[in-house]
Image (cartoon, rainbow, N blue to C red):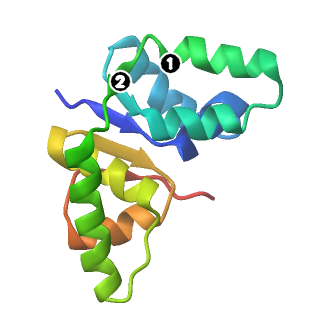
């Protein structure tokens, strides 16, 4: 069975209730204990919290999911990926490179709406489940 990395684009829809299809996809994965995340996703969500109560709610709810550490080696490899892509004219945020590399190295399927991951996936393949924003 696959395990999944849920990107912040998906979590925003999940918590704000924008797309019922997102909730239907993510909820069973939470119940089956199949979701991973890293500090980037958590930070992006916490920074976007509307108030302190939501900040605490988000922080507390992520404690039950699997956390991936981001060490020196991950930063170095993600930087190399970014360097190679930049040489080909593709500028990708470091945060997206780190997430893609985490998924690639741990065989996680990334669930996202962020188009940057399609570009990364063309150069450095990993398991990607892309949801169109509309």
The C terminus lies in quadrant: bottom right
Q: Nearer the viewer, residue 82 or 72?
A: 72
Q: Are marks 1 and 2 in contact (CB under 8 Å)?
A: yes
Q: Is residue 56 above or below residue 111?
A: above
Would residue 56 appear left or right of 123 to someone viewing this image?
right
Q: Quadrant of residue 51?
A: top right
Neighbourhood count class around disc 1 (C-alpha, 10 Å): few under 14, some 14–19, many 20 upward: some
Q: Splitting the image into 4 quarters, where does residue 94 fall?
A: bottom left
Q: Could you tell which of marks 1 and 2 lies nearer the N-terminus? A: 1
**Residue 55 position (above or below residue 107):** above
Q: Residue furthest front?
A: 72
In the displayed structure, does residue 39 sit left or right of residue 58?
A: left
Residue 6 visible in this rendered orientation of the protein: yes
Name the residue furthest right: 51
Q: Is residue 58 left or right of residue 115?
A: right
Tell me which residue sits at (40%, 12%) in the image: 31
Could you tell me which quadrant the N terminus lies in?
Answer: top left
Q: Secondary structure at mark 1?
A: helix
Disc 2 secondary structure class: strand
Measuring from the top left, give residue 57's x and y in whole percent.
67, 14
Estimate the spatial distance between the alpha carbons at disc 1 and disc 2, rounded to whole Å: 8 Å
Residue appearing at x 45%, y 54% in the figure = 95
Residue 21 visible (yes or no): no
- Viewer-closest of 38 and 17: 38
**Which label number is shown at residue 105?**
none
How many neighbours does mark 2 have within 10 angstroms: few (below 14), some (14-19), or many (20 or more)? some
Residue 67 numbered tag: 2
Please give left or right for residue 17 compared with residue 123 in the image: right
Which residue position is annotated with label 1? 62
Q: Position of residue 99 (x, y in %)?
A: 36, 48
């Amino acid at each position: 069975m696959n395990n999944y990395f849920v990107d912040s684009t998906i979590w925003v829809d999940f918590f704000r209730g924008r797309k019922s299809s997102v909730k239907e996809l993510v909820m069973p994965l939470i119940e089956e204990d199949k979701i991973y995340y890293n500090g980037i996703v958590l930070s992006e969500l916490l920074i976007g919290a509307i108030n302190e109560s939501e900040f605490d709610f988000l922080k507390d709810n992520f404690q039950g999911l699997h956390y991936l550490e981001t060490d020196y080696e991950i930063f170095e490899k993600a930087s190399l990926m970014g360097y190679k892509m930049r040489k080909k004219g593709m500028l990708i945020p470091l945060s997206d490179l780190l997430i893609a590399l985490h998924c690639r190295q741990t065989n996680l399927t990334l669930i996202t709406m962020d188009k940057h991951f399609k570009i990364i996936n063309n150069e450095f393949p990993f398991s990607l489940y892309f949801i169109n924003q509309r």
